[in-house]
């Protein structure tokens, strides 16, 4: 029987639900199979690498879903300033409220390692490509090349998403200062 | 004399012994990665007995590694402080922080070896959701240097963004910008970072509505 993408997705979602409920450490392959209503053998057919491969697939799936939602959240933004502000605010809120992420970070952070190592560069490129048209539409300071600025901003967006540092990103006034002064000070004319 | 560490202990001797053992540990890690290093390797490196190692570090390998980390962080910051202290303006400060920190970390043999043998030990402090501590301690170190040209709150924020930049390029290098190269870093810093640090706020200041200090910040136009 051929593997179907739908069933693969169903297995990932069922595993995700188990992790959300019990935490990654207490989620076994049996739990995941049971939650998905399939046998262990079926689960292994989709994830021959067992628990490691299954959990990596869950993290990768959730990672992609996070950025899909982020892009959706800023779809309505018209200017460089607002897309940055809305994006940072949304991402920060989504991360703070992401219970499963915090569960994983506090119990098995190494689960995130390979996904971040594999996807980090792609994500930076993705954010940069998303920001580029906004930069091209915006009047820029003398000498600023949109592509360079896009890469710089993508790096900074990822950095502030990963750690807020001295900033309270739940405060729109602070996000505004961060974006308009700190990040776009050298870019937007 | 093979038992160079076995001399009667005085405060000076024990400090020197500690340092010898720490450097030996760093060398051993650079060769094999941290997990493979044994107390015997370290003892062999300084030609002393296991007992001498345990006398200096009763906690064994873990204690030596913790002390080695602390020593290396202190060395790193003091190297940075020397060059940052010489900066004549804000732009020079940022350029020296970026280039010296990057060169130091990229050419650190022990760190490079660990990145190959146990990357998770290195990356776990720098990656998403786990870099808060690194960010806070590095920014706290750098803030006083920035405070020569910026009011304190802004100095802290500016120090932090420079740390972010360095961490971003260390964990995700770029073929376009070599952070060790002063000639490439300077225009980048002047273009993207300095204006944000000295910007007269287009929006409301965060807390204390103080006037922006822009004493010596170099104009970038």
Image: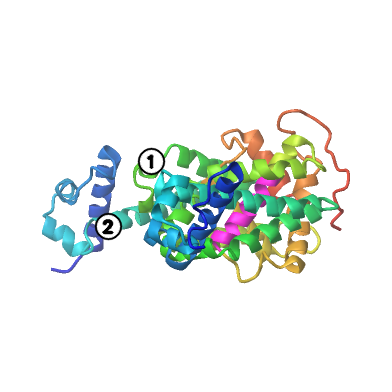
Q: Taking the image as drawn, is residue A133 in sight? A: no
Quadrant of res A98: top left
Q: Which of marks 1 and 2 is nearer the N terminus?
A: 2
Picture layout, residue B195 above or below residue B119? above
Chain letter of mark 1 equals A
Quadrant of res B59: top left
Closer-to-camera residue (B58/A16): B58
Q: Does the magenta stretch include residue B165?
A: yes
Closer-to-camera residue (B169/B43): B43
Report the residue at 49% width, 50% height from top: B125
The answer to whether tags 1 and 2 share a subunit is: yes
Residue that extends furthest to the bottom in the rendered view of this protein: B175
Closer-to-camera residue (B141/B132): B141
Give the secondary structure at mark 2. Answer: helix
Q: Taking the image as drawn, is residue A96 in sight? A: yes
Q: Give the range drawn in magenta.
A: B159-172
Give the secondary structure at mark 1. Answer: helix
Residue A28 placement (x, y as % from top left): 20, 48
Image quarter hosting the N terminus of chain A: bottom left
Q: Name the residue under label 2.
A: A52
Q: Cα distance, mark 1 to mark 2?
A: 18 Å
Residue A58 placement (x, y as % from top left): 31, 53
Which disc number belongs to residue B200? Answer: none
Rate crowding at label 2 as few (under 14), some (14 to 19) or many (20 or more) other CA atoms within 10 Å: few
Closer-to-camera residue (B166/B68): B68
Q: Mark 1 points at which residue?
A: A106
Report the residue at 52% width, 61% height from top: B111
Residue contact between numbered discs 1 and 2, judged by CB atoms under 8 Å: no
């Amino acid at each position: 029987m051929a593997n179907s993408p739908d069933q693969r997705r169903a297995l990932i979602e069922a595993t995700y639900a188990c992790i959300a409920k019990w935490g990654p450490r207490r989620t076994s392959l049996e739990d995941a199979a049971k939650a998905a209503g399939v046998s262990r053998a079926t689960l292994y057919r989709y994830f021959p690498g067992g628990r490691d491969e299954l959990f990596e697939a869950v993290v990768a799936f959730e990672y992609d879903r996070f950025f899909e939602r982020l892009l959706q959240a800023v779809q309505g933004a018209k200017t460089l300033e607002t897309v940055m502000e809305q994006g940072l605010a949304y991402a920060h809120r989504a991360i703070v409220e992401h219970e499963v992420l915090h569960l994983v970070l506090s119990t098995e952070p190494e689960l995130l390692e390979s996904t971040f190592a594999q996807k980090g560069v792609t994500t930076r490129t993705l954010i940069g490509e998303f920001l580029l048209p906004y930069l091209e539409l915006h009047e820029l300071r003398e000498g600023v090349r949109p592509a360079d600025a896009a890469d710089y901003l993508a790096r900074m967006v990822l950095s502030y998403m990963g750690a807020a540092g001295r900033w309270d990103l739940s405060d729109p006034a602070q996000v505004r200062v961060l974006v308009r002064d700190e990040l776009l000070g050298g870019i937007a004319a | 004399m093979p038992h160079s560490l076995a001399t009667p202990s005085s405060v000076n001797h024990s400090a020197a012994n500690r340092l010898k053992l720490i450097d030996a540990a760093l060398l051993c890690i650079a060769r094999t990665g941290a997990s493979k290093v044994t107390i015997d390797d370290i003892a062999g490196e300084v030609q002393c007995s296991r007992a001498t190692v345990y006398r200096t570090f009763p906690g064994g390998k873990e204690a030596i590694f913790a002390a080695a980390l602390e020593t290396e962080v202190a060395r790193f910051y003091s190297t940075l402080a020397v060059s940052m202290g010489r900066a004549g303006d804000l732009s020079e400060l940022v350029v020296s922080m970026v280039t010296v920190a990057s060169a130091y970390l990229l050419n650190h043999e022990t760190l490079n070896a660990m990145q190959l043998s146990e990357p998770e030990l290195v990356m776990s402090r720098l990656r998403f959701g786990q870099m808060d501590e690194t960010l806070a301690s590095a920014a706290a170190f750098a803030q006083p240097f920035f405070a020569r040209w910026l009011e304190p709150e802004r100095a802290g924020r500016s120090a932090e963004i420079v740390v972010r930049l360095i961490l971003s390029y260390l964990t995700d290098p770029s073929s376009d910008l070599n952070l060790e190269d002063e000639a490439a870093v300077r225009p980048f810093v002047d273009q993207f970072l300095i204006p944000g640090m000295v910007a007269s706020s287009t929006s409301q200041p965060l807390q204390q509505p103080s006037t922006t200090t822009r004493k010596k910040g170099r104009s970038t136009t």
